[in-house]
Amino acid sequence: MFIHQREKWPDFNWDREKLFAKLGDVRHRQGKILGQMQAFGFKIQEEAMLQALTLDVVKSSEIEGKLLSEEQVRSSIARRLGIEVAGTVTTERDVEGVVEMMLDATQRYDHPLSQDRIFGWHAALFPTGRSGMYKIKVADWRDGPMEVVPGAMGRETVHFTAPAAEKVPAEMDGFLHWLNDQQELDLVIKAAIAHLWFVTIHPFDDGNGRIARAIADMQLARADKSRQRFYSMSAQILKERKGYYEILESTQRGELDITPWLEWFLDCLYHSMEETEQTISRILERARFWENHSGQEFNLRQQKMLQVLLDNFFGKLNVSKWATITKTSTDTALRDIQDLIKKGVLEQEESGGRSTSYRLKNIS
């Protein structure tokens, strides 16, 4: 029996004593992050928010096996929020749709979530009316059965069966009424319940996971009372993906006591906030770098590559990598690098010859 088949569904219950300490830790960490960010300048706040939103969009899609260009996502968010960034790129329609949904959820968190609004999110996710090669029902509730059956072809196992299609409209009416109601319930706990409840109804042919996480993000923005997002729950869920699917499955096969799910959600949220402190440190490092070199001019390729290097570039930087990333010739890449060496921005590492590599100089 699945949780939605229980007699008292969706009358969830949980052990408040077990959650008390975890919820307190999360709330304390929330306040600490918001306090830290308010102490920084506007530009640093913008950069931290841009990074968190970019991660959220990219990683929420990656959880479902859909890889988006981080560069395109960042450019789309920056353009929509009026944030000036170097090296913006043209964005594809599927990227624009995911960004549109996430920004509507987080920037308009104080607006009710209606059926029409959630249909708009779904339409933004699937602008062609297809999921991959398959035509799906877009901006409307599904009209067929829904089973979650991960696994290789021929070895599929049914992990979850959602409510029958004819029950979906009534299920969603009840969910949306609860979500928009101002009941006495901590908003972080409400975010966790909303995530579970929506993904259990599974009202669409596809996109349910991404929309569930957008709803949770909207609810977390309500908890913060802020449009500024400085942590990414989706990025942390991706890191803990195995545990995420395991706790969802066990909860959906369990009773209406959802304490284990709420504990997992709070732990995951806390870990995402720990990552934010590292992000803030990197942003401050970048800010100091650009301030130190504010009097120098860099072409667009150099701006792009410096941003890449400041974002913890993996491996060794050489001429061929520069040329590949900036889509230019090796001769042009070498001239760009030599110009930055003259300006005191880059330096050559000790190994030479064919293995010549370069690194940022004095980034602190």
Image (tube, rainbow, N blue to C red):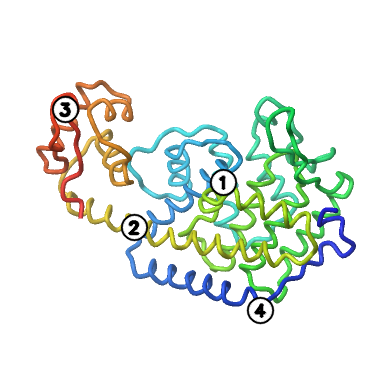
Residue at 65% x, 68% y: name it: 189
Q: Badge 4 is on which residue?
A: 17
Q: Decide if residue 168 is on the left or right side of residue 326.
A: right
Q: Decide if residue 136 is on the left or right side of residue 78.
A: right
Q: Earlier in the sequence, mark 2 or mark 1?
A: 2
Label 1: few (<14), some (14–19) or many (≥20) C-alpha neighbours in 10 Å: many
**Which quarter of the figure has residue 279?**
bottom left
Q: CA distance from mark 2 to mark 1?
A: 26 Å
Amino acid type for the residue under numbered disc 3: Arg
Image position of 70 with respect to 236: above or below:
above
Q: Badge 3 is on which residue?
A: 335
Q: CA distance from mark 1 to mark 3?
A: 39 Å
Secondary element at tag 4: helix
Q: Badge 1 is on which residue?
A: 60
Label 4: few (<14), some (14–19) or many (≥20) C-alpha neighbours in 10 Å: few
Image position of 265 with respect to 73: above or below:
below
Q: Do the numbered discs 4 and 1 sit on residues whose CB atoms are within 8 Å?
A: no
Along the viewing direction, whichever of 94 and 308 lies nearer the viewer:
308
- The image shows residue 3 at horizontal and vertical percentages of 81, 57
